[in-house]
């Protein structure tokens, strides 16, 4: 099977922010709130003893969580510097954890050892939005998991109410609607990354070897990460917004208008 070329800019872009990523997002108020919402689903989807494939693992936060749940993890990322941070964290926080970090962009998933079999797949926080050919990824994943295996995929939405209203309030109309066309470019330091925003319906079609079991909104009333300064000024309000999110996250239409959507697919055919 063929695949598109590795988008080197994405790996380079995240190399440039790897050193401060945990401080700016992982340990931020917004990042913690959104990740906790994802983890609630992860905890009831994967079981101790399972082998989970993680795509776009970043600094290893989710891999370490899975390991604490008793899972073994093969964690992939396109950024060498992100993986360096992830390996350091594993050595410091959980040196005996069954995690293998590997430098491999999602576009090159076909290069992963075919002898490896997985009980499920996790991709958190928009890594898949930076992949042009998601159909190729879906095909590769379908070859590596058995029927009944879950995929938990967290992607940025096309319509984020927080983003639209925030930038409209600042008079920045282009930024307010930057996702709505379905694609955009993001500048990370000196690198340009092309980002896709597929709809829920489109993703259901792309991942045809899998059936969509649920869609959960992440960050509906909790703001996007670039509003961390605002969140720090309003900690009590943030706690209230987290509670509201837990109520709204399953509602049709509303669930795909947050910062992210968490999709639970299940392998249904060879």
Image: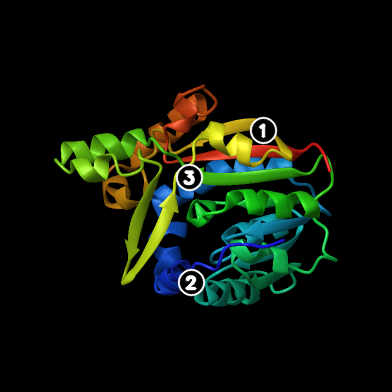
Residue 173 percent location from the top left of the image = 19, 40
Of callouts 1 and 3, the N-terminal one: 3
Label 2 packing within 10 angstroms: few (<14), some (14-19), many (20+): few
Q: Nearer the viewer, residue 194 or 214?
A: 194
* Res. 212 mark: 1
Asked if residue 27 shows in the view, the reply is no
Q: State the separation of the CA atoms marked 2 and 3.
A: 28 Å
Which residue bears the numbered disc 3?
A: 34
Q: State the separation of the CA atoms marked 1 and 2.
A: 31 Å
Q: Nearer the viewer, residue 88 or 265?
A: 265
* Res. 8 mark: 2
Does residue 151 sit above or below 169 in this rendering? below
Of callouts 2 and 3, the N-terminal one: 2
The mark closer to the camera, 2 or 3, is: 2
* Res. 110 mark: none
Residue 169 percent location from the top left of the image = 17, 37
**Viewed as shown, does residue 126 lie left or right of 17?**
right
Label 1 packing within 10 angstroms: few (<14), some (14-19), many (20+): many
The mark closer to the camera, 1 or 3, is: 1
Label 3 packing within 10 angstroms: few (<14), some (14-19), many (20+): many
**Viewed as shown, does residue 70 lie left or right of 173?**
right
Of callouts 1 and 2, the N-terminal one: 2
Residue 73 percent location from the top left of the image = 73, 62
Residue at horizontal 66 percent and vertical 71 percent from the top: 101
Residue at horizontal 71 percent and vertical 69 percent from the top: 111
Number of numbered discs visible in the structure rendering: 3
Q: State the separation of the CA atoms marked 1 and 3.
A: 21 Å
The mark closer to the camera, 1 or 2, is: 2
Q: Which image quarter is the C terminus in?
A: top right
Which residue is the extreme one toward the front? 2
Label 3 secondary element: helix
Label 1 secondary element: strand
């Amino acid at each position: 099977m063929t695949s598109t070329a590795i988008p080197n800019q994405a790996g380079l872009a995240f190399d440039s922010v790897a050193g401060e990523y945990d401080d700016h997002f992982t340990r931020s108020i917004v990042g913690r709130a959104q990740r906790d919402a994802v983890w609630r689903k992860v905890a009831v989807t994967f079981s101790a003893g399972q082998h989970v494939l993680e795509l776009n693992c970043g600094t290893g936060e989710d891999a370490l969580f899975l390991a604490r749940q008793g899972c073994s993890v093969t964690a992939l990322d396109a950024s060498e510097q992100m993986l360096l941070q992830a390996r350091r964290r594993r050595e410091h926080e959980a040196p005996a954890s069954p995690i293998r970090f590997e430098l491999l962009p999602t576009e090159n998933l076909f290069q992963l050892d075919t002898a490896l079999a997985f009980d499920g797949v996790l991709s958190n926080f928009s890594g898949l939005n930076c992949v042009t050919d998601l159909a190729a990824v879906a095909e590769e994943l379908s070859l590596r998991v058995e029927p009944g295996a879950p995929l938990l995929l967290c992607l940025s939405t096309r319509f984020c109410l927080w983003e639209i209203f925030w930038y409209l309030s600042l008079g920045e109309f282009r930024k307010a609607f930057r996702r709505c066309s379905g694609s955009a470019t993001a500048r990370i330091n000196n690198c340009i990354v092309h980002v896709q925003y597929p709809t829920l319906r489109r993703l259901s079609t792309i991942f045809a070897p899998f059936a969509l079991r649920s869609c959960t909104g992440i960050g509906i009333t909790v703001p996007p990460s670039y509003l961390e300064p605002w969140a720090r000024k309003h900690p009590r309000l943030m706690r209230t917004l987290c509670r509201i999110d837990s109520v709204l996250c399953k509602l049709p239409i509303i669930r795909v208008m947050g910062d992210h959507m968490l999709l639970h697919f299940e392998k249904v055919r060879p």
